[in-house]
Amino acid sequence: MSLIVQKYGGSSLANADSIKRVARRIIETKKAGNSVCVVVSAMGDTTDELLDLAAQVSPSPPEREMDMLLTAGERISMALVSTAIANFGDSARSFTGSQAGVITDDVHGKARIIDVTPGRIQGALDAGHIVIVAGFQGMSEGTKEITTLGRGGSDTTAVALAAALKADVCEIYTDVDGIFTADPRIVPSAQKVSRISNEEMQEMAASGAKVLMLRCVEYARRFDLPIHVRSSFSHHEGTWVLPPSQSEGDDMEAPIIAGVAHDRGEAKITVVGVADLPGKAAQVFNAVASAEINIDMIVQNVSAIGTGTTDISFTCPKADAQRAVQALQRAKDDIDFGSLQFEDQIGKLSLVGSGMRSHPGVSATLFQALADAGINIDMISTSEIRVSVVTRDDQLDEAVRAVHTAFGLDSSDGEAVVYGGSGR
Ligand code: ASP
Ligand code: MG
């Protein structure tokens, strides 16, 4: 008998009918002779609606209460899925994250899982029940408070439980057939890939691909766990995200490019007129770091006309950008810069593929494709297996389509199917 961990996202649980459909699918998996542990997200756009509601009650809701509020979304799903399964004649038991033994640190809103003690769910599985666990939540070891794992965190719950239970498979069910060479909502000719290395998937997720949460991919790598991403609306084979033990040495067959990701979640800040002296960049980024803000791209250029100053630009999450500006303003006298520029109408395109390591000319093809489409590049950054560019927000979709075509990624057999969800 195999043990299967399945995770169903919000778009697969949008209403009562979808809940019944998912319940039937879970029962099918069990009837095929498996033990089944299921992780559920909140129904549809529930999490966003709860966030909107909180914002109407208070401009700065306490973090602890936000976690109490948001975890309710997943608890609604777990009880309804369990109830639907019981109605179809099978037996299920639902558990909150803390009941399931998901132990986290105490950072509200983006807690990290530090341990999983799945005794209760193991017991329920051994007794022959289907287990339904509320995703995206746990309990802090130190404070015993309820925590959430950050947006999209149910994926991480599923991988963590699969690792702790030593499951045979971790299946992540979503509203598309797997991982595509680009977001099919923007590029209808995007193709499903049958396999992708964990390393490439980490770069895609870090570059804005929302199909899997970054932390879940990191977690799967650490535990050498394969993930099968597939649609709950079809029975098609999805995409396998392969851990290092299963993807290394496979490079000969692998395509050069895994995909094109995009991200609209960042803003750009430019510190204008910083003295060109040792220690100035350190001062700028110390100011930003002291506000606990993660920085993505950095560009610095010394003025060529000999003014002795430089401009330093960087990007960070839009949600943190105002705090970054405030932190820099507080440090203005110490750093001694001219002014600050802020730009949030930007988008980032990232081309990802481990074949870049051994194939020259990838960047040249990328820049030519953007040039042919008349798209201006604002910033560039690279890693071993990624090239990212920042463009104007309103040109980003066109940029993604142009690059997708230039690398021969367009499918010849029809359009990708998006089964549900608002992509919100
Ligand atoms: N419901 C949470 C969210 O929308 C967690 C999840 O879906 O994984 O971000
Ligand atoms: Mg969700």
Image (tube, rainbow, N blue to C red):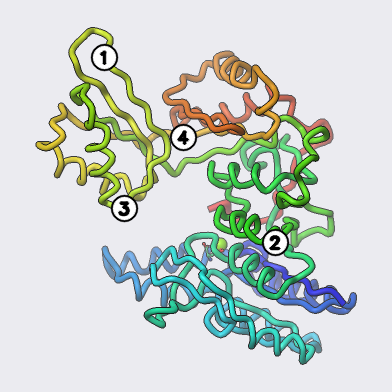
- The answer to whether the residue bearing label 3 lies less than 8 angstroms from the nearest atom of ligand 1 is no
Q: Residue 303 bears which disc, if any?
A: 1
- Give neighbour class at mark 1: few <14, some 14-19, many 20+ (Cα, 10 Å): few
Q: Residue 172 bears which disc, if any?
A: 2
Q: Residue furthest right?
A: 32
Q: Nearer the viewer, mark 4 or mark 2?
A: 2
Q: Earlier in the sequence, mark 3 or mark 1?
A: 3
- Give neighbour class at mark 2: few <14, some 14-19, many 20+ (Cα, 10 Å): many
Q: Position of residue 255 (x, y in %)?
A: 76, 32
Q: Position of residue 197 (x, y in %)?
A: 71, 45
Q: Which residue is mark 4?
A: 347
Q: Earlier in the sequence, mark 4 or mark 2?
A: 2
Secondary structure at numbered mark 4: strand
Q: Nearer the viewer, mark 1 or mark 2?
A: 1
Depicted 270 relative to depicted 20: above or below: above
Q: Nearer the viewer, mark 3 or mark 2?
A: 3
Depicted 112 relative to depicted 375: above or below: below
Label 1 to label 2, Cα distance in Å? Answer: 50 Å
